[in-house]
Image: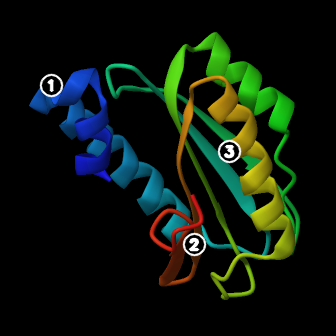
C-alpha cells in the first residue's frame, strides 16, 4: 500500500516522514480492528489528505452480522477534509473474512461516487479473527 500511494502522490515525490506517518496510522487502525473483534460488526473509515496524513477516523458501530455505512456522510466528510484517499474497513463477527453481497455492493457504490470526485478508495479490508480480505489485493478495486 505504501508504494502504491507514494507512487501516485505529487508525481512520486513524497517525503518519507509522510509515508511513515500514514503507515503508523494504518498499523494503529489495523491493531484496533483485529483486537476488537466482538459479537457485532464495526466499520472504520480513515480519511487521508494530499500529504498522506490521516485527517479523520470515522467509526460506525453495527450489530451482529451487519454494519450500515452512511455513504452520504462518508463522501461529505471526504470532501470537507479535502481528502485524496479513503480507506474502508470493518470486521466480520462470524469469523469469515469473505465479503458479503452487501459488502461488494457498498464498496462498488462508494468507489464509483468517490472516483467521480477524484478521491481514491484506497482499499476495503474485512477483518475476521486472524484472517483478512482486501478488495484491492483481490482485484476488486
Coloring scheme used = rainbow
Q: Nearer the viewer, residue 49 or 58?
A: 49
Ranked by sequence position, the earlier of labels 2 and 1 is: 1
Tell me, yes or no, whether the two marked residues, 2 and 1, touch with CB atoms within 8 Å.
no
Q: Residue at x 88, y 65 (%)?
A: 63
Disc 2 from disc 1: Cα separation: 32 Å
Q: Residue at x 67, y 33 (%)?
A: 114
Name the element at disc 3.
helix
Q: Which quadrant holds the C terminus?
A: bottom right
Residue at numbered disc 3: 111
Q: Is residue 70 above or below residue 73?
A: below
Crowding around mark 3 (Cα neighbors within 10 Å: few <14, some 14 to 19, many 20+) is: some
Ranked by sequence position, the earlier of labels 1 and 3 is: 1
Q: Nearer the viewer, residue 124 or 111?
A: 111
Residue at numbered disc 2: 127
Q: Quadrant of residue 22?
A: top left
Tell me, yes or no, whether the two marked residues, 2 and 3, touch with CB atoms within 8 Å.
no
Q: Quadrant of residue 6?
A: top left
Ranked by sequence position, the earlier of labels 2 and 3 is: 3
Q: Position of residue 72 (x, y in %)?
A: 85, 29
Name the element at disc 1.
loop
- Answer left or right for 61 relative to 120: right
Label ID, residue 13? 1
Amino acid at each position: 500500500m505504501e508504494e502504491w500511494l507514494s507512487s501516485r502522490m505529487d508525481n512520486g515525490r513524497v517525503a518519507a516522514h509522510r509515508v511513515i506517518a500514514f503507515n503508523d496510522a494504518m498499523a494503529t487502525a489495523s491493531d484496533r480492528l483485529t483486537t476488537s473483534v466482538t459479537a457485532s460488526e464495526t466499520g472504520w473509515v480513515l480519511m487521508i489528505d494530499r500529504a498522506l496524513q490521516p485527517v479523520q477516523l470515522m467509526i460506525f458501530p453495527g450489530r451482529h452480522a451487519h454494519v450500515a455505512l452512511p455513504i452520504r456522510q462518508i463522501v461529505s466528510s471526504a470532501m470537507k477534509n479535502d481528502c485524496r484517499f479513503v480507506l474502508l474497513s470493518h470486521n466480520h463477527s462470524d469469523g469469515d473474512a469473505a465479503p458479503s453481497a452487501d459488502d461488494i455492493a457498498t464498496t462498488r457504490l462508494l468507489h464509483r461516487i468517490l472516483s467521480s470526485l477524484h478521491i481514491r478508495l484506497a482499499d476495503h479490508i474485512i477483518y475476521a479473527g486472524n484472517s483478512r480480505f482486501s478488495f484491492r489485493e483481490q482485484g476488486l478495486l
